[in-house]
Amino acid sequence: MTTKLRNHERQWRLSSALYTSIVAASAAATVLGLGTAAIGGAVDPVAAVKTASPIKRVIILIGENRGLDHTFGTYTPKGAGQTISNLLSKGIVNADGTPGPNYALAQQYSVAGQPAWYFGAPNAAKSPYNPINLMPQPNTNGAPKAQGSSSAPFLSSLTSELATLEPDLPASQDVLLTTGATGLATGKLDTRVPGAGSLSGPFPLQGPNLTDDDYTGDMTHRFYQAAQQQDCSIANATATNPSGCLNDLFPFVMATYASNSSQGNEMGFYNSAQGQVSFLTTLADRFTLSDNFHQSFLGGTAANHMMFGTGDAVFWTDGNGNATAPKSSLLANPNPKTGTVNTYTVDGNFTGCGDSTQPGVAPILNYLASLPYHPASNCQAGHYYMIDNVNPGYLPNGALANSEGGIPPAPLRTIGDALTAKNISWAYFGGAYNDAVALSNAAVATNPSKPNLSTAAAADPAHALGTAYCQICNPFSYMTSIMGNPTQRAAHIKDTADLITGIETNTLPSVSIGKPDGLLDGHPSSSKIDLFEGYVQNVLTALQKNPRMLAETAVFITWDEAGGYYDSGYVQPVDFFGDGPRIPLLILSPYTAGGKVNHAYGDHVSLLKFIERNWSIAPITSRSRDNLPNPVPSAANLYVPANSPAIDDLFDAFDFTDPPSVPNYLP
């Protein structure tokens, strides 16, 4: 273990000790019957709102592009009698990260060229990767070669401006913005990975020259590519895997669908058993981790955040809420180009899945029809759904974006609209949002017909961090009901600074959604997982200082998607759009302590269902996924719902039967 890693872990341990003492005080206040309605001597209106549980506030923090096996693949639960489904428990790898006795369970394959796009490759066309037929090897795709000299996030040394440049990181973690460059040319073999050049399966992102404080190569993670990676076919279904998804084409798809690709990064994982992702591991040790929580949409960031915000997929409109078709160049055609194995004809961002004659649609519809529980496609005729990243129709300041590749303003009802209708307070807190608004104002003033935030940032370096605000991560930024209404926008779309202030001043709403900016979101190549840990620590540190609020708050920490990383877990097809691989979900509260692991099947919509049940809110619409029932585990495999399609509401992860006590609250 390197000195750099040891110092990093020491910082987290010091923070954990503070966390222990404050949360213990919080639990003591609850046990002593001090209540939660009066905070700091003032009446707290949020605490007075009737809820189905003792939880009066929810904070949801969402990182970028990390899978469960990728993040917790060697994790061992600390709670008595707890089990977990991961690389280590299945014997795929050993605790030191080396291949385990069941390494073959993660076998990956290549596929001979096929005449059309497939959802479930023909088994006869597949060839196993092995030490002779090597899988694509990890590369440095998109990761920085060297630290920059003048601007975050790649500063070569600490400067007095660093904290100002990134205010959402604790001062003790500012150093993380100055470290982690690869020292290698981008897109080349990542020689920092032990064994790079001869790997044939899952490998640890750990070695003498590689820690969780280093930037690593990115992967493409788009809808039709992710669907191929899962390799689902009813022909491969078994009693324990009734969906027949094999998860065995991860490196192959990424290495073949385009000429400039991410190669074998998909099989990399961090080793929590050897001290990596130490802060997240500490939280798992103390609270509850789900090992059956999934990205809800195959593919990328925007569509998964949209499913979280609406329980549905957004579609192209005429700008007035009416479904219509985009221009043909935006429609996906994943059928391979002539003479290629898997290079898509058009890697578009929209699909008309209500029409089985559209390219790529029939294989998925036929597969869904073959499943014994026949899930509905949830695709409407004449609707063209966004399946990959597309900018919203509004700028962060609410002005029309007028962008060439953006989607027009959308009419979908959101969880925000549902909360507002019930007079339940809520807000979305985006990192660097205030800076993004300033840039939007400048961009509109400069060129109202085609505003450009990057151009505005060049002229206004004081607000340059605004370009790191993630527009596609905010599902509400697409919606006319919120972004098109100045009052709603001002009330509900805010900056991370407002999240911290809300905690400090007891003005935090009932439901808070936090999304870090692009420097801190943990996205491979453009961020690091320890930077996301730092963002989480910043929020929890503020919460630690308000023990009464902490006693009534549930914090959910999750990710938008697995980012293309391999995962060994079961996948339940819910509709045309997903589900996808497992992602981590950490559940922090006085009622989820003890180092437990929750096995109930869930996805992003489970968070909506928790909110709806806790505040007595009906499903968002008649077609949104939050209408699905809670899962009943099957006898053959507790990770598989016997009543598919089904999605958990996460109440079973909490123990509300008795008031929390100090001895039981912190293990």
Image: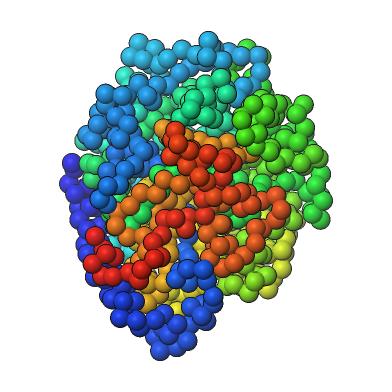
In this rendering, position of residue 8 left or right of residue 504: left
Is 381 rendered above or below residue 131?
A: below
Q: Residue at x 38, y 25 (%)?
A: 106
In this rendering, position of residue 27 left or right of residue 253: left
Residue 354 seen in this snapshot? yes
Quarter of the view holding residue 395: bottom right
Q: Quadrant of the C terminus?
A: bottom left
Whole-percent x, y for residue 433 in the image: 54, 63
- Marker count (numbered): 0
Q: Residue at x 61, y 29 (%)?
A: 371
Whole-percent x, y for residue 663 in the image: 23, 67
Is 436 rendered above or below residue 130?
A: below
Q: Nearer the viewer, residue 666 or 439?
A: 666
Q: Nearer the viewer, residue 504 or 654?
A: 654
Q: Residue at x 48, y 78 (%)?
A: 47
In this rendering, position of residue 335 left or right of residue 271: right
Residue extending farthest front: 635
Whole-percent x, y for residue 546 in the image: 36, 76
Q: Residue at x 54, y 75 (%)?
A: 50
Is 544 rendered above or below residue 584?
A: below
Q: Quadrant of the N terminus?
A: top left
Q: Nearer the viewer, residue 502 or 390?
A: 502
Q: Nearer the viewer, residue 603 or 643?
A: 643
Residue 294 seen in this snapshot? no
Quarter of the view holding residue 342: top right
Is 320 rendered above or below residue 217?
A: below
Whole-percent x, y for residue 471 in the image: 59, 54
In this rendering, position of residue 360 left or right of residue 430: right
Is the image coloured rainbow, by chain, by secondary structure, or in one colour? rainbow
